[in-house]
Image: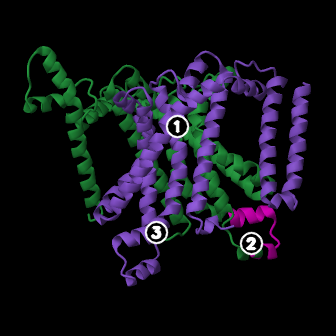
Chain colours: A green, B purple
């Protein structure tokens, strides 16, 4: 309880500020309407009107919650208007990118730790690759994969998402695979262990805590990548596409509902990865 | 066919050279490391060119570096205007405002343990969210010009920086704090002489993460509406016009600005945190 109190207080303050901001930002529209109608409105009349506009500048929390609820429950979850459906599309893209990113990150890390030439030539470019804003590449990835015969819109999304998520895995795994100290390596060499045995029995187990720690960062990055990938690639489904549609058709409520659906998805994914991390740690005997 | 064979031969030769360089004494020096990395980069470009020519890929799908290079040279004024609009006006303004705000907020939060306990979990959570989704909302609020792009960047960089800076302010040693107490240092003195310097490695770590986010935010925000200048605008319209050489030219500029921004921050970091173990030669 002592830990929850401050968080709840801050959350409460955020909601209060949000309501105040909503009244302040949406009031302009109410005053404009009143002026056009030739009437005057008092502040007491303005406030209720700022709470229930169809196209508010800033929708108050209960309107967003209502839209979110409508998006989840008002139709079958396979419907094109259902947020569950769009959320699932984004989730699938995220998972594909996440898996691809993990495989790529681990494979590169293994090669970098094993071969010095890989470290010297690939590592600097891996760092540079992350300073390149991926969104610039996103439309290109779509065009190229389209032209070489991949009609599936999932593939470019997964590539973008993997591009963002492989890096944290790579960096942590390089660190983790190098974490055994000299004593341990020396011990294995006195046993006459081969390179493969050293890798399997020492380096790989030693790297696992680093691996799981990097997964949390990687899953968040994968989700950002998927959503960004849904924006310019002309995707018609997924939470990113919902945001784009809300923006283009001037429907702020759709935009906000998609935004919060994405936030909930992110929270859930991070929670699950955290659980897996804790389970793995428990199995490996790390004190909680 | 000869292009394919040539590119493959070049790749093999460069790789063999790199293997030898990496094993040699030269490979352990700074110049050696740069040479190996540069050689690898050049190899990628040669392979790209070789594949494009060898398979006769249409320039509408994937132009080779030999097409993109001249395109960059011939459209410098447009690229410069896009760079000013997106990077200098949008990304850098937002980056500076966001960094200052996070810096100030972290110092304010640091004085109150209650706010720390309340804001840190939320800040941690928010910095993992796809904040980039706020871009359409902010474009609606601040209009199509660079102000909305800067606003997106501010929101994107604020939380990662805040979390890093608060962690940094708490990163002082017990021993150091006790020393300050025996000097009977005031809050300001402790902040200026001990805690801010100690927080700097963390802050710069956050700045490095934020630098990439800033460019992503500025470009994504342009997909939701922009004046007829800017890197995001250029990319989305040129893709529509199949002017892919121009798209790749813009990507090259984006990559250069991203790397330059990162390099600049790393340079300032090495000057400010010269005392930190990771900076020692």
Within-10-Å neighbours for mark 3: few <14, some 14–19, many 20+: some
* Nearest the eye: A67 or B150: B150
- Chain containing the residue with disc 1: B
- Say if the magenta span includes residue A197: yes
Q: Which mark is residue B171?
A: 3
The percent position of residue B279, horizontal first and vertical second, equals: 63, 64
Residue shown at the point (42%, 26%) measured from the top left:
B144
Give yes or no for contact between labels 2 and 1 (Cβ–Cβ under 8 Å).
no
Q: Which residue is mark 2?
A: A185
The percent position of residue A79, horizontal first and vertical second, equals: 39, 23
Position above or below: A152 against B25: above
Mark 3–mark 1 distance (CA, rounded to whole Å):
33 Å
Which range of residues does the magenta coloring cover?
A: A187-204
Residue shown at the point (47%, 55%) measured from the top left:
A274
Q: Is residue B130 visible?
A: no
The kind of secondary structure element at disc 2 is helix
């Amino acid at each position: 309880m002592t830990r929850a109190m401050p968080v709840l207080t801050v959350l409460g303050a955020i909601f209060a500020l949000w309501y105040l901001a909503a009244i302040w930002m949406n009031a302009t529209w109410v005053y404009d309407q009143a002026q056009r109608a030739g009437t005057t409105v008092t502040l007491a009349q303005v406030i209720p009107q700022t709470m229930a506009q169809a196209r508010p500048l800033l929708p108050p929390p209960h309107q967003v919650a209502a839209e979110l609820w409508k998006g989840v429950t008002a139709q079958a979850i396979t419907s094109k208007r259902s947020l569950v459906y769009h959320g699932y599309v984004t989730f699938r893209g995220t998972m594909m990118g996440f898996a691809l990113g993990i495989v790529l990150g681990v494979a590169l890390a293994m090669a970098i730790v094993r071969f010095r030439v890989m470290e010297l030539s690939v590592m600097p470019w891996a760092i540079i690759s992350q300073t390149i804003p991926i969104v610039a590449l996103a439309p290109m990835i779509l065009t190229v994969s389209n032209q070489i015969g991949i009609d599936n819109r999932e593939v470019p999304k997964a590539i973008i998402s993997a591009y963002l998520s492989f890096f944290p895995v790579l960096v942590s795994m390089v660190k983790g695979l190098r974490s055994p100290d000299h004593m341990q390596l020396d011990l294995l060499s006195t046993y006459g262990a081969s390179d493969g045995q050293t890798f399997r029995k020492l380096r790989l187990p030693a790297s696992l805590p680093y691996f799981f720690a990097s997964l949390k960062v990687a899953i968040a990055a994968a989700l950002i990548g998927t959503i960004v990938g849904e924006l310019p690639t002309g995707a018609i489904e997924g939470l990113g596409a919902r945001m784009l549609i809300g923006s283009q058709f001037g429907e702020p409520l759709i935009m906000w509902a998609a935004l919060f659906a994405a936030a909930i998805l992110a929270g859930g994914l991070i929670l699950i990865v955290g659980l897996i991390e804790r389970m793995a740690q428990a199995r490996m005997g790390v004190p909680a | 066919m000869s292009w394919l064979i040539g590119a493959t031969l070049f790749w093999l030769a460069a790789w063999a050279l790199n293997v030898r360089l990496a094993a040699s004494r030269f490979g352990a020096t700074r110049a050696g490391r740069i040479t190996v990395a540069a050689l690898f980069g050049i190899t990628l470009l040669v392979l790209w060119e070789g594949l494009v020519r060898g398979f006769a890929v249409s320039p509408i799908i994937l132009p080779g570096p030999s097409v993109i290079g001249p395109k960059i040279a011939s459209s410098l004024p447009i690229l410069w205007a896009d760079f000013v609009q997106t990077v200098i006006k949008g990304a850098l303004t937002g980056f500076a405002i966001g960094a200052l705000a996070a810096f100030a907020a972290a110092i304010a939060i640091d004085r109150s343990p209650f706010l720390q306990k309340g804001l840190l979990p939320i800040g941690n959570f928010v910095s993992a969210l796809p904040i980039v989704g706020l871009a359409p909302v902010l474009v609606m609020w601040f209009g199509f010009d660079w102000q909305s792009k800067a606003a997106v960047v501010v929101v994107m960089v604020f939380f990662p920086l805040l979390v890093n800076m608060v962690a940094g302010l708490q990163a002082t040693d017990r021993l150091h704090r006790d020393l300050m107490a025996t000097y009977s240092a005031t809050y300001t003195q402790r902040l200026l002489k001990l805690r801010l310097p100690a927080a700097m490695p963390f802050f710069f770590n956050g700045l490095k993460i934020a630098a990439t986010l800033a460019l992503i935010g500025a470009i994504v925000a342009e997909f939701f509406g922009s004046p007829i200048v800017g890197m995001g605008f250029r990319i989305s319209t040129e893709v529509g016009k199949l002017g892919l050489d121009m798209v790749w030219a813009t990507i090259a500029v984006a990559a250069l600005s991203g790397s330059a921004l990162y390099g600049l921050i790393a340079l300032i970091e090495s000057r400010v945190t010269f005392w930190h173990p990771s900076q020692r030669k």
